[in-house]
Amino acid sequence: MGGVNPAGRTSGHQAFRRTVLDALPEAEQTSTLLGLAAMMRLAHCDADQRWHNAQGQVLDAAQLALETRDQVLSHTLIRRIEDPRFNDEGLPANRRANLALESPLTFRLRRRQLPDNLPPTWQVREVDRHHLEVTVPAGQMDVMLPETRQAQVRAAGQLPSGFDPSQLYRSVHHPRGLSMAVFAASDCLGDSGLDWDSLRDRLDPDAIAVYAGNSIGQLDDEGWGGLLKSFVSGKRATSKQMPLGYGQMPADFLNAYVLGSVGATGAALGACASFLYNLRLGIDDIRSGRRRIVMVGTSDAPITPEIIEGFRTMGALADDDSLKALDALELLTDADYQRASRPFARNCGFTMGESSQFVMLMDDSLALEVGADILAAAPEVFVNADGWKRSISAPGIGNYVTLGKACSLIRDMLGETSLRERSYIHAHGTSTPKNRTTESHVFDAVAKAHGITDWPVVAIKAYLGHSQGSAAGDQLTNALGSFAYGLLPGICTLDRVADDVHAERLRLFKDTQAFKADASLINAKGFGGNNATGVLISPEATERLLAKRHGADAMAAWRERREATRAQAAVYHQQADAGHFAVRYRFGEGVLEGPELEVGADSIHIPGYQQPVSLSVDNLFGRLDEAGDELDTPFADERQEKR
């Protein structure tokens, strides 16, 4: 796994540890704080393993962790938006106005600033080579007057302060979401402890796939955001804004600059469920045998004035006025902004977040063969729509189906006791009044159907905010941390469960709790009726399942190979914790256009790839004889045989 969100780096469970920090032993707290401090450029570790603060002073680890603790805690997770435009500076805008000129108006401007199509009444006189004088006659004149508007939403889950992924590689005007994706995928490769080039050389290049995207494309100024407002803002559109804005571009960047993959690619967009949609594509590919490795992920950077205004206008966000009314406050402090997201408590809307999360999926035989460190098993993602709806953005009935199926799979794989006593839910938990009632009713109804009486519920958006299409990626990678540490993050902003929450069979808690889980249910509810529930099986339960399939000898050999993998991953984690990030970005390397290929009837050999691409395909549709009038193999029989 790899990525970055407001809690920090995904690899090595750094971001998870930030959400359970107070429950960790002192040594783990210190290492977590130092890793975040290095990420935020508050500290760095030199080649001799000596820690320095931002002023260059050498300090021991415990002292430096204490010195930077308040800064790290205050500038991670949800907090006041640090973009100055959202605060005193104000959001740049224009106001349309009609000027009544009582007398002619004369002004000077640079020649290149003069509009191409002038109003017929304007008079223009050349002052010099570069400047013109314009006279506008008396009368009516339509203009746009620049202004700043006070932001009505000032809280968001932002990446740790001081961390900018675009500064870690040769980024040239990349949208923020794509820079985050490059970092996240690189972090995933480092966390794997496997050498990607060696791993790729073992396989047919077509046995690798990438499914990655986001929910709303790249809408900052470097992507479609800048493109769409270029005319009205007076700024020139660039040649990069159009292509880099597409929602599937995170996958494209991985193929072209990180992995060099020629296998299957694409992105499934499903609003807030987008990560799980892409995960489902990867699972289906591996289960069918079409692929052996799939990189799955999303990357969303939606903290822009326009996107936040769009969600605020819908009434979906916790804006300043609503937060004040909720707590009967006249002014909001930094501490109030940190409590903006309150899943299943009295709340007033969700809080925007940004995140990029990637996981590497692998079929079980290959995982054992290469000694992969198995963090969990992902057997299935269930997706169902809501049917008829009154409002396209309102929740509906599809989530009852997805969660019910997920529970049935866990019961069938692990047994009734595991489902009832050793499973828990990673809730979508957006912090809106509608979500707290509808999602909790889904949980309660399904719990009742399965005889569950005390189902733990985690709502990680209390820490991170809602990162849109990457939200389920935040949930899934956090669940991997719970498997590793035996801890469930509490809902840190939950002072009291709201009266309209269906909590009879649910365990909603504020502080971190110890819990040994066999399975986690990753739940997502997206606008438009995009419901998805993914199933994660703990590494311990996964090993028991693998032992039944592959036998004790194969598992013993895998554990021996895994030691080298873990050692290599540990080296990466140590470097990353020190603030030394090995971002993999290979622009312009190994570029091929076609004539270099060796094209045969049964395979294609690509220079730079160890194995050829097999062109053999599965035919499930039957065969005609030479005369073309007889079916050699009935379609139904062969399809059944394939199954």
Image (tube, rainbow, N blue to C red):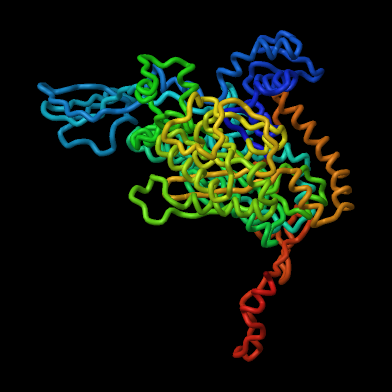
Q: In this orientation, does residue 91 appear?
A: no
Residue located at (56% from left, 48% from top):
533
Residue located at (66% from left, 50% from top):
416
Relative placement, left or right, of 373 versus 594 is right
Q: In this orientation, does residue 264 appear?
A: yes
Q: Within the image, what quadrant is residue 126 found in? A: top left
Residue 624 in the image: x percent, y percent? Answer: 63, 85
Q: Within the image, what quadrant is residue 2 found in? A: top right
Residue 378 in the image: x percent, y percent? Answer: 66, 49
Compared with 289, 126 (above or below) is: above
Relative placement, left or right, of 586 versus 552 is left
Q: Nearer the viewer, residue 29 or 412?
A: 412
Compared with 249, 638 (above or below) is: below
Residue 10 in the image: x percent, y percent? Answer: 65, 33
Indicate the quadrant containing the N terminus: top left, top right, bottom left or bottom right.
Answer: top right
Residue 306 in the image: x percent, y percent? Answer: 39, 33
